[in-house]
Image: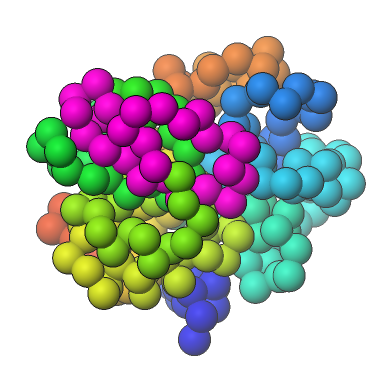
Amino acid sequence: MTLPEEYIDLASRISGSIQIPGISSIHLPKIVDDAEKPDEFGFVFLQDGSAGPFYTSLNETLQELWQLYPQQKRLDINVMDLIAQLTSASPAENAVALGAYNALSQHVMKRAGFLPAETGNMGLSKPEPGQTIGMVGYFRPLIEKLTSQGVNVLVLEKNPDRVEIQNGIKLSTNPADLTSCEQILCTASTLINGSLEELLDVSRKSSSNFNLIGPSGSGLPDIVFNHGVDAIGGFQVNDQAALLEALDNQESWGHAGTKYQLTPDTYPGIDQLLNQIRD
């Protein structure tokens, strides 16, 4: 069974165990012709206010999403029908499907009364000067923080033109190079483009600590923990009104929620969450 199939299977198990709310809307960023614009995210909103972020800046994903969902409110779409698109050949459909899975996950955690621990470091253990950190995807602010501490960064990026080469930074397009890294920070958008399984295979060949980070990783982590992910960072919306206002104004929305980190030691597992909801 592939990772997307495992995600769908887990979501089906949840929907068969508890009643889940419908989808109220899908928010998509506006299309802006600006090569320097920051990475952008869409959101799937459920009727109880649960929100699931998903990455929209992979190639032509955003343009395709606008074609698929020109009307983003009052949608007659079932949550499970959206999540089923995780196995689609379309990155755009994969993206919104992951958003639906993340929204369902946030609903489950909220109903179970589970509050992940807030974090500001996206799951990165404190590195030592001279160490090499593998980075799948380009996180510019984090790179600046690491290089200022004397840490080397190996960036694995499918769009090399995005990477600003400077002292302490090495660019690669070969996942096998990650075996030389003490820690690996991997963008959760790899759940959308289908590359996560290959990266985890590489990680298992080394002693690297593998951290999945970014808003797209805001889903229940049972599946990725079973596949060797050591920590996952996500985003939990605390103020939907503030989030919607920021999205409408095309402004930063980090203040509307909190970043969090989950590990196998701090996450109770889907069985316990569902039991808490049923009890």
Magenta region: which residues?
146-170
Report the side of 245 relative to 126 (left or right): right
Report which quarter residue 159 is drawn in: top right
* Residue located at (45% from left, 71% from top): 197
Observer able to see residue 67: yes
What is the tally of numbered marks visible in this picture? 0
Quadrant in the picture for the C terminus: bottom left
Whether residue 262 appears in magenta in the rendering, the answer is no
Q: Quadrant of residue 77?
A: bottom right
Q: Is residue 217 visible?
A: no
**Residue at coordinates 26% horizontally, 38% vertically from top-left?**
152
- Look at the image and say whether residue 168 sits in the magenta stretch: yes
- In the rendered structure, the answer to whether residue 19 lies left or right of residue 212 reads right
Tell me the residue at 28%/64% (across/down).
179
Vertical relation: 80 (above or below) 159: below
How far from the left and from the top, in percent, is residue 146?
Answer: 26, 29
Q: Is residue 188 left or right of residue 109?
A: right
Residue 222's spot in the image, x, y percent? 33, 67
Question: Which residue: 37% across, 36% down?
Answer: 169
102 vs 93, nearest the viewer = 93
Residue nearest the viewer, comparing 36 with 214:
36
Q: Observer-nearest residue: 4 or 83?
A: 4
The colour scheme of the drawn protein is: rainbow
Q: In x, y percent, where is residue 184?
A: 30, 52
The picture places residue 44, in percent across and down from the top left corner, at 62, 44
Q: Residue most toward the front?
A: 167
Left or right: 93, with 279 as reference point: right
Q: Is residue 29 above or below residue 278?
A: above
